[in-house]
Image (tube, grey):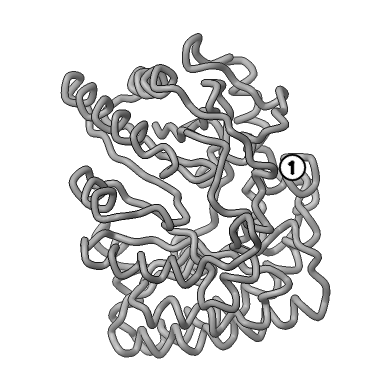
């Protein structure tokens, strides 16, 4: 079970594509954070995960430190395994905070959109200035502390034509795990989608060459599509569990099925409880089961089971309905899938060792 604690509604950046919306001064109290940990423990069988989000969670570093220490103490008492995650823009890291992350094995996902051109187009501070230069200074500190690093990047219609340069920049700077998502709320059109396609084609060439050199890269648009070909289609409810195996805790202590429903303008239709009183189980499982239903628009589509129509949270954010897939997603997946498949076919035909270890080794060992 994973509990995502939204420790603040505030942020030191004002990213133009942020789905959270208006920043607020809502803060999670120490009492609520402890209650959230204790509630997660009650749901756990052998292990649990505490993840920190905001806004920018490092604005509440003292709260994070106290919460981690409490979670570790409770886990030891109950003989449970505990792990920690954090999603951060990385600008508030210093040596003390990085040392704390390392000591407590906090895996964090760093929001970084690539090179300065792509990153500073959207990830700006309150004065409208880009944050790339400051973040790159902190990246060196992160490396010195030998922390495992995952980067979450976003591509928008305005940065689509720079995708190849942005992603190459990340890989050339020693980042080997990149989760890339398009801005689903952006004003995409045929021109920008075509620019995105050219970018993916260029990244595909780079990805293949790095694998040929023996380097193992994780690039989510390719790896996840290749995985659905190698290991079979995705069953709904496996990736987007939306309240089944994870839940989000608002600063108030209210429970929601996914991070995307914790917003200043609370939608009570998706409130599934409170850390102090527990789940509203009937409402919770009604949402879980609805998210596991087939997407009517996708009936008969040859990409169903391979495309990301399973994300009920994105569907709701863009169309207002968990089951209604946004038109852009269809265009995006039909553009991306053939590129990812070509990458997989090339490396499979070449019997690339890195590729086969990533996608087939587990299956071979199972037999």
Residue at the image point whose x is 30% and y is 55% from the top: 94
Residue at the image point whose x is 20% and y is 24% from the top: 73
Give the x, y percent position of residue 218.
Answer: 40, 69
- Which residue is identified by label 1? 323
Q: Quadrant of the N terminus?
A: top left
Which residue is at the front of the view, 149 or 350? Answer: 149
Q: Residues within 10 Å of mark 1 (few under 14, many from 20)?
A: many
Q: How many marks?
A: 1
Q: Measured along the vertical axis of the image, is residue 51 above or below residue 135?
A: above
Q: Measured along the vertical axis of the image, is residue 60 above or below residue 156?
A: above
Q: Measured along the vertical axis of the image, is residue 329 above or below residue 201?
A: above
Residue at the image point whose x is 62% and y is 15% from the top: 282
Residue at the image point whose x is 50% and y is 82% from the top: 343
* Residue 356 appears left or right of 169: left
Q: Residue furthest front?
A: 127
SS at mark 1? loop
Instruction: Name the quadrant containing residue 354.
Output: bottom left
Give the x, y percent position of residue 106.
Answer: 29, 46
Which residue is at the front of the view, 309 or 118? Answer: 118
Give the x, y percent position of residue 134.
Answer: 44, 67
Instruction: Name the quadrant containing residue 174.
Output: bottom left
Q: Quadrant of the C terminus?
A: bottom left
Give the x, y percent position of residue 319.
Answer: 80, 46
């Amino acid at each position: 079970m994973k509990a995502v604690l939204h420790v603040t509604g505030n942020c030191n950046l004002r990213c133009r594509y942020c789905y959270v919306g208006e920043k607020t001064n809502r803060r999670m109290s120490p009492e609520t954070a402890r209650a959230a940990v204790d509630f997660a423990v009650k749901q756990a069988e052998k292990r649990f995960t505490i993840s920190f989000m905001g806004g920018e969670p490092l604005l509440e570093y003292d709260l994070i430190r106290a919460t981690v220490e409490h979670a570790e103490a409770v886990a030891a008492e109950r003989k449970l395994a505990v792990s920690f995650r954090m999603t951060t823009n990385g600008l508030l890291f210093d040596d003390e905070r990085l040392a704390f992350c390392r000591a407590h094995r906090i895996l964090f996902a760093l929001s970084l959109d690539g090179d300065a051109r792509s990153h500073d187009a959207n990830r700006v501070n309150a004065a409208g200035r880009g944050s790339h230069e400051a973040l790159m200074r902190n990246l060196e500190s992160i490396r010195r502390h030998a922390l495992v690093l995952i980067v979450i990047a976003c591509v928008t219609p305005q940065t689509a034509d720079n995708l190849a340069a942005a992603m190459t920049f990340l890989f050339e700077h020693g980042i080997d795990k990149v989760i890339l998502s398009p801005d689903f709320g952006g004003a995409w059109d045929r021109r920008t989608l075509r620019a995105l396609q050219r970018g993916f084609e260029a990244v595909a060439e780079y990805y293949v060459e790095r694998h040929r050199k023996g380097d193992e890269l994780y690039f989510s648009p390719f790896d996840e599509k290749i995985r659905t070909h190698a290991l079979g289609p995705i069953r709904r409810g496996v990736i987007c569990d939306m309240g089944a195996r994870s839940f989000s805790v608002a600063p108030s202590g209210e429970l929601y099925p996914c991070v995307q429903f914790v917003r200043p303008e609370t939608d009570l239709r998706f409130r599934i409880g409170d850390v102090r009183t527990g789940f509203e189980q009937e409402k919770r499982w009604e949402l879980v089961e609805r998210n596991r239903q087939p997407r009517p628009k996708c009936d008969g589509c040859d990409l169903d089971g391979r495309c990301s129509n399973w994300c009920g949270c994105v569907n709701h954010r863009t169309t207002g309905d968990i089951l209604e897939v946004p038109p852009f997603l269809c265009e995006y997946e039909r553009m991306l899938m053939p590129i990812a498949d070509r990458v997989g076919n090339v490396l499979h035909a070449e019997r690339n060792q890195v590729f086969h270890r990533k996608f087939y080794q587990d299956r071979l060992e199972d037999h």
